[in-house]
């Protein structure tokens, strides 16, 4: 039992340790096994268990490798191993036929192959007459190879699993099965087949087994062999093998039977020898035989009491019945203090008790809850973290069902994890300190050899490259990580200064030298810069260089000590974020933000030079019909094709031009430095000619005809700034569309009258506020782990009397510009809190509500007081409320944002960054904001299936958010494939039309009552 317990604990620790370091960038090992081949491998609730997985976890050290474990049918597993899709499987039988496909490790143990029949099968079976019977074998298993290649038997039945083989044997579909005796013993004992099945022929083949390794990973053979030798040497392998195979073997039961017989003979001897106490002894023996159950229970209690894990027994009321010794050590309570009392009342923190009661109810209903982490409070008030496994036990010996819980104390792991997170934030400071430490260590040469070796170890194993430059000798000595720059076994760590300079990118050398020279002139002691340095493969990587300069008594530089910190990945990520902030990911054209910046710059120059320019706003006519008829993927291809054709035409123009995508199906062109305005008409005419021919789309393998409408505005004649020009060109575009589309119009002053529409909307908005014409629709947000509704997002809708619903895209901009958004926003918050309270009265207690905030509303005076009063008015728990605000809105006027967020977060309200990734803001600011999550914009989600870049960005956002302790919500999930990808990469929550479109309060209540949406 101790050996078994030791292996179990080692396996559990390995599982959690590997899961804790999974974020580190170690080499990934893809390990796959047969999903139904117990005790080697089997799957329960989607998790892989068995001897193979436990042994693999012991072999691959977590500080070197990340082990990715999966399962499938054996046929698929072997195909993937041969093709290189996975790296390793096993242990499997070593066959000459397989050696041409895969590598094998040294043999681990021997497998014996036998032939099994039903006990009532009376015919004689030999190897020679085996072909005359109906034989069953596992598909693609080594036993099938033996049957075909060695026994030359071609007619047989194959089965996907061992279980299927035995079922077919018992049902008479086959006469015999050929199978590994080790596997057969397991099934005979586990499934109580021993009375129905027997072995006819033993050891017809005796074969060695080892791990199978892909020929793409030959380096793993030596590593696995070495690790196996270690595990065998220290006895861990034997303990693991004993745990899985000894109790399911016939040898084990024969040994037990011998022990029983010996015990009985010994008792008889004692009876004869001590005749004076025969009656007493016989009574005692009879009593023990009759009370076998009690003896077993005492034995079980002894094991449980001395186990190095928490073992509890509770009734369905949650009252403690059994409390073992290890539980006493962990909690500080004695058994007598807790028996009869409720576990939740004693050990669960008060703020967790409601959740704990729900979990306990699930366990009591036989919903097994395993590998569940929770915190408990000990007798002295300390907090411990425990991983629980639970099972409900019912049988005729018990008066009532009992819950048996085992718990593993992972408090040290949690503490180490917390320390790791804290040390990660201090990494930058640590690197700088290492530079200073290096100088100190160089000066302290009189220290003991032990101190010198410690210094050498630190420097040689640091992850960055440290260097020391002697100005007089112009020689550089290197320490730390050199492998990225040099073939370290072929180069002296001291190299010539000019050879080092040659590693810099030619475009960076001048700037670096000027920065260093300027520091020398000013006698600066610190120099910092970023540059590109060539690695040993000839590729340039970005490094952040930090230098400390030492001067002599005359003020001349004497020595430089520097550290090169590789931040290529960070640089690429920042560049990608900046690119997404200013460029459209679909067409790779500048987006609206960059377009407006460029237009503003050109308008200012035009006012100074007197030259004119023009803005052409292009809208694809009836583009919505393309999306509706063919889907968004075809619509996206159409946008890309149109943008490419227009861009190709613009390349041939001699006039300076800029082309951008400024909206869904809108593009804009700037023509700068025009000699005459008529040229713009020529350009628009030529662009229209592009659309006289059909546009071929590969996704539907046919061409489509489409037309465009264009508006034209000139600067500086039609406006003094970007806002006026864009307003006027938009009016011209509207006129072109009103004229039947496929047209272009030049802005004229009379178009300003059309601006009256906006004024009309503003007037109606004011009436709508007075008459309370706004309603809220709700869209569910789903927990992607259990597919239950976690929260709902409140979305405003306006039903204008006699006109119907007004699009939020139409009235929200007017409300923002007029300031009415503040009052409308308050109405939204109040309606949402009122609805939330109504749901609580109807028994819907565990739902959260998300409310969108505009930047203008968020920054208004007394906003915090308004929210606090509304929460008090409707008696709503702030913990159930979250506000969504854009990242740009959050970091504008950062100090004010921080104050408001801090105040509301103290109340319990959560904040999420909405449309994350579409704007651009400093990640430093975002890290400082007390937010609890981010919402990934639907533009990224729509690209997931066919854009590696979008998937990489989404994965990066999720990884970054989880590192910061934030939750992630994906917006715009429209199909199951997107949902599968998001689950795979660890997204927490999702919303979109796949689950439900925004619906009225009454309709969303139906979802909330059933806690799930149907997809």
Image: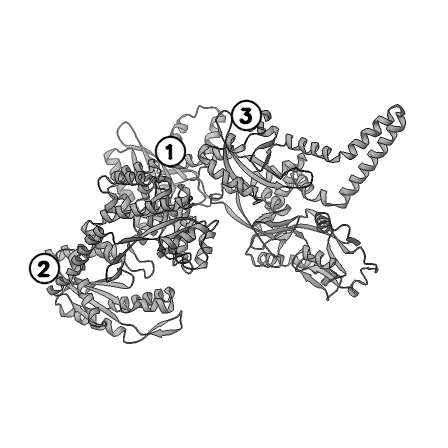
Label 3 or label 2, whichever comes before in sequence order: 3
Percent x, y of residue 485: 42, 45
Task: Give neighbour class at mark 2: few <14, some 14-19, many 20+ (Cα, 10 Å).
Answer: few
Q: Nearer the viewer, residue 410 or 226?
A: 410
Query: What residue did someone put label 2 on?
Result: 610
Image location (x, y in percent) of residue 885 = 30, 47
Toward the viewer: 434 or 276?
Answer: 276
Q: Are marks 3 and 1 in contact (CB under 8 Å)?
A: no
Query: Which quadrant would residue 445 be assigned to in this image?
Result: top left
> In front: 399, or 451?
399
Relative to 725, residue 505 above or below? above
Q: Is 739 left, or right, of 181 in this rendering?
A: left
Q: CA distance from mark 1 to mark 2?
A: 56 Å
Vertical placement of 410 versus 643: above or below? Answer: above
Closest to the observer, 264 or 797 = 797
Residue 671 visible, this angle: no
Marks 3 and 2, how far apart in space?
85 Å
Name the disc covering residue 254, or none: none
Residue 141 visible, this angle: yes
Distance from label 3 to label 1 (Cα)? 47 Å
* Element on which disc 2 rests: loop
Residue underneath mark 3:
332
Camera-nearest label, 3 or 1: 3
First along the sequence among labels 3 and 1: 3
Left/right placement of residue 921 relative to residue 40 reads: left
Residue displayed at 53% across by 44% down: 65
Label 1, on which residue? 435
Which one is in front in this view, the residue at disc 1 or the one at disc 2? 2
Q: Residues within 10 Å of mark 1 (few under 14, many from 20)?
A: some
């Amino acid at each position: 039992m101790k050996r078994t317990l030791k292996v179990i604990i080692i396996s559990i620790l390995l599982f959690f340790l590997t899961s804790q370091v999974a974020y580190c960038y170690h080499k990934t090992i893809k390990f796959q096994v047969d999903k139904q081949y117990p005790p080697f491998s089997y799957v329960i609730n989607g998790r892989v268990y068995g001897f193979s997985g436990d042994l693999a976890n012991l072999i691959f050290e977590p500080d070197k490798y990340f082990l990715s474990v999966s399962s499938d049918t054996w046929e698929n597993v072997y195909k993937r191993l041969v093709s290189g899709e996975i790296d390793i499987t096993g242990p499997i039988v070593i066959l000459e036929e397989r050696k041409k496909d895969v590598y094998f490790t040294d043999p681990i143990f021997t497998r014996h192959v036998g032939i099994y029949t039903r006990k009532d099968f009376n015919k004689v079976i030999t190897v020679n007459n085996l072909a005359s019977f109906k034989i069953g074998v596992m598909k693609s298993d080594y036993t099938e190879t033996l049957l075909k290649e060695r026994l030359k038997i071609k007619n047989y039945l194959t089965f996907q699993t061992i279980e299927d083989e035995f079922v077919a044997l018992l049902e008479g579909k086959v006469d015999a099965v050929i199978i590994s005796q080790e596997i057969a013993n397991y099934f005979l004992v586990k499934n109580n087949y021993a009375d129905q099945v027997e072995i006819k022929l033993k050891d017809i083949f005796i074969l060695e087994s080892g791990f199978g390794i892909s020929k793409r990973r030959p380096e793993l053979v030596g590593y696995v062999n070495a690790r196996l030798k270690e595990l065998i040497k220290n006895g861990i392998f034997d303990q693991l093998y004993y745990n899985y195979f000894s109790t399911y073997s016939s040898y084990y039961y024969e040994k037990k039977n011998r022990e029983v017989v010996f015990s009985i003979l010994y008792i008889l001897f004692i009876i004869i020898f001590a005749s004076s106490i025969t009656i007493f002894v016989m009574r005692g023996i009879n009593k023990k035989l009759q009370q076998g159950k009690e003896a077993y229970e005492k034995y079980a209690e002894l094991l449980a009491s001395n186990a190095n894990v928490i073992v509890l027994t509770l009734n369905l009321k949650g009252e403690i019945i059994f409390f073992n010794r290890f539980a006493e050590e962990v909690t500080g309570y004695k058994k007598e203090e807790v028996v009869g009392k409720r576990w939740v009342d004693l050990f669960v923190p008060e703020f967790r008790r409601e959740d704990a009661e729900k979990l306990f109810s699930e366990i009591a209903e036989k919903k097994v809850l395993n590998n569940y982490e929770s915190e408990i409070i000990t007798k002295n008030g300390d907090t411990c973290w425990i991983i629980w496994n639970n099972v409900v036990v019912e049988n005729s010996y018990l008066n009532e069902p009992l819950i048996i819980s085992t718990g593993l104390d992972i408090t040290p792991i949690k503490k180490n994890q917390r320390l790791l997170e804290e040390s990660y934030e201090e990494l930058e400071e640590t690197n700088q300190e290492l530079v200073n430490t290096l100088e100190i260590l160089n000066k302290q040469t009189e220290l003991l050899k032990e101190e010198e070796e410690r210094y050498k170890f630190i420097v040689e194993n640091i992850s960055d490259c440290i260097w020391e430059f002697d100005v007089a000798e112009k020689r550089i000595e290197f320490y730390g990580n050199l492998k990225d720059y040099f073939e370290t076994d072929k180069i002296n760590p001291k190299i010539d200064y000019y050879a080092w300079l040659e590693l810099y990118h030619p475009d960076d050398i001048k700037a670096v030298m000027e920065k260093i020279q300027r520091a020398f002139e000013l006698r600066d002691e610190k120099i910092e810069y970023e540059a590109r340095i060539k690695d040993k493969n000839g590729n340039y990587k970005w490094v952040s260089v930090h230098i400390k300069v030492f001067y002599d008594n005359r003020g001349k530089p004497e020595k430089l000590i520097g550290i090169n910190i590789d931040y290529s990945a960070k640089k690429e990520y920042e560049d990608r974020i900046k690119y997404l902030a200013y460029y459209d990911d679909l067409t790779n054209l500048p987006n609206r933000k960059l377009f407006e910046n460029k237009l503003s710059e050109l308008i200012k120059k035009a006012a100074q030079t007197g030259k004119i320019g023009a803005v052409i706003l292009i809208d694809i006519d009836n583009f919505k019909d393309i999306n509706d008829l063919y889907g968004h993927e075809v619509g996206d291809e159409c946008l890309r094709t149109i943008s490419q054709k227009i861009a190709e035409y613009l390349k041939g123009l001699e006039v300076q031009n800029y082309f951008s995508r400024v909206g869904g199906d809108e593009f804009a062109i700037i023509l700068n430095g025009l000699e005459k305005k008529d040229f713009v008409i020529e350009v628009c005419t030529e662009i229209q000619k592009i659309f006289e021919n059909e546009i071929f789309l590969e996704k539907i393998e046919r061409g489509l005809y489409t037309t465009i409408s264009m508006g034209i505005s000139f600067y500086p004649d039609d406006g003094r700034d970007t806002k006026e020009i864009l307003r006027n060109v938009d009016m011209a575009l509207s006129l072109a569309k009103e004229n039947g589309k496929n047209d272009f119009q030049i802005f004229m002053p009379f178009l300003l009258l059309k601006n009256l529409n906006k004024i009309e909307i503003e007037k109606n908005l004011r009436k709508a506020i007075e008459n309370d014409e706004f309603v809220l629709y709700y869209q569910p947000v789903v927990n992607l782990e259990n597919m239950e509704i976690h929260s709902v997002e409140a979305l405003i809708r306006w039903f204008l009397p006699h006109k119907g619903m007004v699009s939020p895209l139409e009235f929200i901009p007017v409300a923002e510009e007029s300031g009415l958004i503040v009052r409308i926003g308050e109405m939204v918050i109040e309606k949402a809190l009122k609805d939330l309270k109504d749901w609580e009265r109807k028994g819907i207690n565990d739902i959260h509500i998300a409310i969108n905030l505009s930047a203008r509303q968020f920054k208004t005076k007394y906003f915090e007081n308004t929210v606090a009063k509304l929460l008090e008015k409707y008696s709503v728990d702030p913990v159930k409320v979250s506000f969504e605000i854009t990242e740009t809105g959050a970091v504008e006027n950062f100090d004010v944002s921080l104050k408001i967020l801090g105040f509301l977060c103290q109340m319990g309200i959560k904040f999420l960054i909405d449309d994350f990734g579409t704007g651009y803001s400093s990640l430093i600011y975002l890290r400082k904001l007390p937010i609890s999550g981010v919402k990934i914009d639907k533009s990224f989600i729509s690209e997931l299936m066919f854009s590696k870049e979008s998937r990489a960005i989404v994965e990066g956002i999720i990884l970054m958010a989880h590192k910061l302790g934030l939750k992630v919500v994906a917006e715009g999930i429209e199909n199951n494939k997107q949902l599968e990808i998001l689950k795979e990469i660890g997204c927490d929550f999702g919303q979109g039309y796949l689950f439900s479109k925004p619906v009225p309060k009454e309709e969303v209540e139906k979802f909330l009552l059933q806690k799930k949406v149907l997809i």
